[in-house]
Image: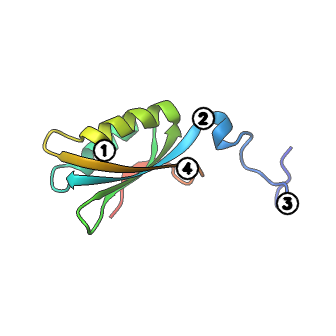
Amino acid sequence: MTIANGPMSTSRSTSSTESGVRRLEAVVHGHVQGVSFRYYAVLQARALGLRGYVRNRADRTVEVVAEGPAPQLDQFLAWLREGPSAAHVEHVGVSWLAANGEFESFEVRH
């Protein structure tokens, strides 16, 4: 039972861990800007049904935040470690967190 505006109010019937939905936060290092990395990351994420964003950072890395089912996130992470053909990925820093459901789609952020 959901009690609106009460201390026991909830918007989900199951937690993100129970439903298998997780959050991947990654920073991709290497030659990853100016090679359509963000464009292809969006295509991959959307094909996998993920939500979140990708953006270039000032330090020439690419930041990725994605939420979705763990198997799809694993596939996306494998793709991030390769990138598009023009990219040269040296390292991907990864953090796994609980999903918070803040995204409606997967997009490029500036």
Q: Quadrant of residue 62?
A: bottom left
Mark 3 → mark 2, Cα distance in angstroms: 25 Å
**Among numbered discs 1 and 3, the one appearing first in the sequence:** 3
* Secondary-structure class at tag 1: helix
Q: Coloured how?
A: rainbow
Residue at which label 2 appears: 20
Residue at which label 4 appears: 97
Residue at which label 1 appears: 41
Mark 1 → mark 4, Cα distance in angstroms: 20 Å
Which numbered mark, 3 or 2, is in the foreground of this view?
A: 2
* Secondary-structure class at tag 4: strand
Q: Residues within 10 Å of mark 2 (few under 14, many from 20)?
A: some
| Residue at 26% in and 54% down | 29
Mark 2–mark 4 contact, CB under 8 Å?
A: no
* Secondary-structure class at tag 2: loop
Mark 1–mark 4 contact, CB under 8 Å?
A: no
User: Farthest residue toward the bottom?
Assistant: 58
Residue at which label 3 appears: 7
Pinpoint residue 105: horizontal percent, then vertical percent.
46, 47
Q: Residues within 10 Å of mark 1 (few under 14, many from 20)?
A: many
Pinpoint residue 14: horizontal percent, then vertical percent.
72, 39
Q: Residues within 10 Å of mark 3 (few under 14, many from 20)?
A: few
**Among numbered discs 3 and 2, the one appearing first in the sequence:** 3
